Image: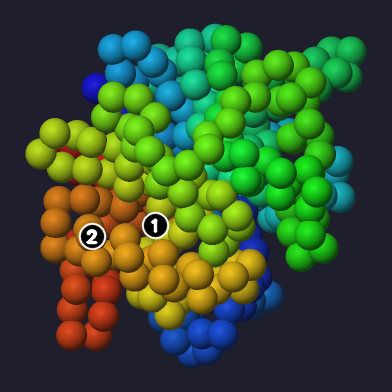
């Protein structure tokens, strides 16, 4: 198996929104905000190449939206979706499966692009796109809290172009990739757990977006059901703490991967490294 990671782009969001009821005095020690109280987030993707498949997990924001929307995100840096894939010697045609953790715009927007006639088409023409059925139904009939995050041009073309496939529940996706379904952030979020033989890698998605969100009480205001998030975190952290299972952080600008320890002050990331370092 081969793994390849890349950061598509960084963007900025309100620090308070990323940490909910946690006081700024506490969260700002982990991720310092700028003068507008914004904090930087990365948009990391992961390619998992097995004997039979080339799987891409999440694909960023894409470039379909208008200037006004894009300007609000304060994007900077990163290497781009196509460019990041190319650095690993993957063309969009080579991707066999796209797993979407969920359908918030910053996780799935790169999967659909506009062609020269303005039609929305899959960026990865040979891929099956996978999303949980629960998340799909939630995204096409959005509640008012999440409606702004589900951009229908990112979502509906998957169905119209015939690339959409549903995951019904937690379970094995293919050899060495298991999908864990969680519901606190949004119903039916999928977190890939990759078996590397003697160690594992958990794709943190929006359950563990950054290293600062590992402690059970550090949660985003974006989470629909924060008590559920806390229980889900507690359950997975109990399973992976002090074991060789690293978390891969999609949104942490500074830290790609980390190992969790159960300390006297609760669960924390106690060592950090790049994916390359974790694999070597
Ligand atoms: Zn999300």
In the figure, is residue 2 to the left or right of 53?
left
Q: Disc 1 marks which residue?
A: 254
Question: Badge 2: how crowded within 10 Å, few (<14), some, or many (20+)?
Answer: few
Label whose residue precedes the other's in the sequence (2 or 1): 2
Q: Residue at x 14, y 34 (%)?
A: 197
Vertical placement of 87 versus 206: above or below? above
Q: In the picture, which quadrant includes the C terminus?
A: top left
In the figure, is residue 70 to the left or right of 31?
right
Vertical placement of 4 versus 218: above or below? above
**Real-space CA distance between mark 2 and mark 1, rounded to the nearest whole angstrom:** 25 Å
- Residue 39: image location, x then y, percent: 57, 67
In the figure, is residue 217 to the left or right of 187?
left
Q: Disc 2 marks which residue?
A: 239
Indicate which label's residue lies in the foreground, 2 or 1.
2
The answer to which quarter of the image holds residue 50 is top left
| Tag shown at residue 72 | none
Q: In the picture, which quadrant includes the N terminus?
A: top left
Query: Could you say which is closer to the camera, residue 225 or residue 83?
Result: 225
Q: Residue at x 38, y 66 (%)?
A: 233
């Amino acid at each position: 198996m081969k793994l390849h990671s890349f950061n598509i782009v960084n963007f900025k969001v309100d620090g308070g929104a990323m940490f909910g009821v946690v006081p700024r005095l506490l969260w700002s020690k982990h991720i310092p905000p700028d003068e507008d109280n914004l904090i930087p987030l990365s948009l990391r993707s992961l390619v998992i190449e097995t004997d039979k498949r080339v799987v891409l997990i999440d694909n960023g924001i894409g470039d379909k939206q208008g200037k006004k929307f894009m300007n609000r995100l304060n994007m900077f840096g990163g290497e781009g979706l196509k460019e990041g894939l190319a650095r690993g010697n993957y063309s969009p045609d080579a991707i066999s499966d796209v797993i979407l953790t969920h359908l918030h715009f910053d996780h799935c927007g790169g999967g659909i692009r506009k062609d020269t006639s303005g039609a929305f088409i899959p960026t990865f023409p040979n891929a099956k796109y996978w999303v949980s059925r629960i998340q799909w139904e939630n995204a096409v009939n959005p509640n008012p809290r999440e409606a702004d995050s589900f951009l229908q041009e990112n979502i509906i073309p998957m169905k119209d172009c015939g690339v959409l496939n549903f995951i019904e529940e937690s379970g094995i996706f293919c050899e060495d990739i298991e999908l864990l379904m969680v519901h606190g952030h949004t119903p039916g979020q999928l977190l890939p757990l990759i078996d590397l033989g003697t160690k594992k890698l958990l794709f943190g998605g929006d359950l563990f977006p950054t290293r600062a969100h590992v402690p059970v009480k550090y949660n985003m205001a974006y989470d629909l059901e924060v008590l559920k998030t806390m229980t889900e975190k507690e359950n997975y952290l109990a399973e992976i703490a002090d074991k060789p299972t690293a978390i891969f952080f999609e949104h942490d600008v500074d830290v790609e991967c980390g190992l969790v320890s159960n300390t006297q002050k609760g669960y924390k990331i106690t060592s950090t490294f790049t994916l390359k370092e974790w694999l070597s």
